[in-house]
Amino acid sequence: MKANVLLEGTTKCLRHKSEILHANPLGDPHVRDLFVYLPPDYHESGRTYPSVYCLTGFTGRGKMLLNDNAFSPNLAERMDKLIASGFVKPMILVMPDCFTYYGGSQYINSTATGNYEDYLTQEIVPFVDGNFRTIADQKCRAVMGKSSGGYGSLIMGMRHADLFGLVCTIAGDAYFEYCYPMDFAKAYRLIKGDPHEFMKKFWAREKQGKDDHSALNTIGMSACYSPNGSDFDLPFDLTTGEIRDDVWKRWLEHDPVRLVEKSVGNLKSLKLLYLTAGTRDEFALDLGARILSNKLNHFDIPHIHEEFDDGHFNISYRYNRSLELISQNL
């Protein structure tokens, strides 16, 4: 074989039927596609491999990590190149689908969306270990993600360190005072007193409006952070737009900066905790990462904090750094 021929891994698509998501409050599918990348030597080696769970951002799902792009490799192509270059060890990548009608689940349990934290930890992890030759040990199981996927990765490390021993977050939601309220005024104007009517119109049209993401993001986060039975409470008054302190307080209870103190033991047990964000992040998540890093330092929690010169979007190249650090710390 010619030396310049790049060996390619194999991407499998499995249909997983979830008991946990069955009869979820939104009626979202409980049978979902799970995409799994297997390294180039998987079928010949007979070896077991570390696994990395790759969590997408808000409005994303696992399949989107494999989108074809003329100017940037998708995650499978990226992994092929990293393995071939020797920067990372061969690893299995797992790309779950935790999308909802409201745009995402934040990878946590909610009475308004469904139990996606349980779905990931109680169903997907054992399903992957049962169907592929993984090293079924938290020391060889990592989780990484960008934006909401970075938030989900932090939650996994804070609450499920028995499953995930390595955590990487790229511009993950943190220090909610900066990253969410900037959307509230736009969301209030678009929702016009009825978030459910907004959602019907949003799904009925093919092209999003200028500020639709602000409204969708606010509704989606409300369903995750301030559920009210199968419905949710918005963080502002629907008549006047005034911030509702009681609801906002409930949001803050989910902020990773506030969760550190409750998660010290789990966070200290991690083999790797990596935080990074661009210094021009449009949602100020570079500041969130700085504040989170300072909080981690206060509790003497080992971690790596890095910044890079970029914003929030089109930064999939930053997966390289996460994968390299995961590989080095296995």
Image (cartoon, rainbow, N blue to C red):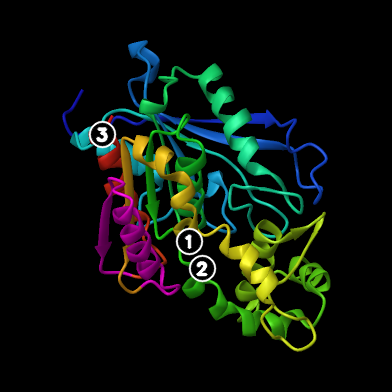
Q: Is residue 20 depicted above or below 109 in this figure?
A: above
- Classify residue 134 as left or right of residue 12: left
Residue underneath mark 2: 176
Distance from disc 2 to disc 3, alpha carbons, whole Å, reads 30 Å
Give coordinates of residue 288: x percent, y percent: 40, 66
Rendered image: mark on residue 173 = 1
Nearer the observer, disc 1 or disc 2? 2
Q: Is residue 246 magenta?
A: no
Farthest-out residue, bottom: 240
Residue 226 horizontal side relative to residue 74, left or right: right
Res. 207 visible in picture: no
Residue 62 is left or right of residue 21, and the answer is: left
Q: Which residues are magenta?
A: 281-310
CA–CA distance in space, label 1 to label 2: 7 Å
Determine which residue is flagged by label 3.
329
In the picture, the quarter occupied by the N terminus is: top left
Question: Label 1 sits on what residue type?
Answer: Asp
Q: Residue 291 in magenta?
A: yes
For badge 2, the amino acid type reads: Phe
Q: Is residue 84 visible?
A: yes
Specify the farthest residue to the left. Answer: 3
Q: Position of residue 322 (x, y in %)?
A: 31, 46
In the image, 104 versus 288, the foreground residue is 288
**Marks 1 & 2, CB-CB < 8 Å contact:** yes
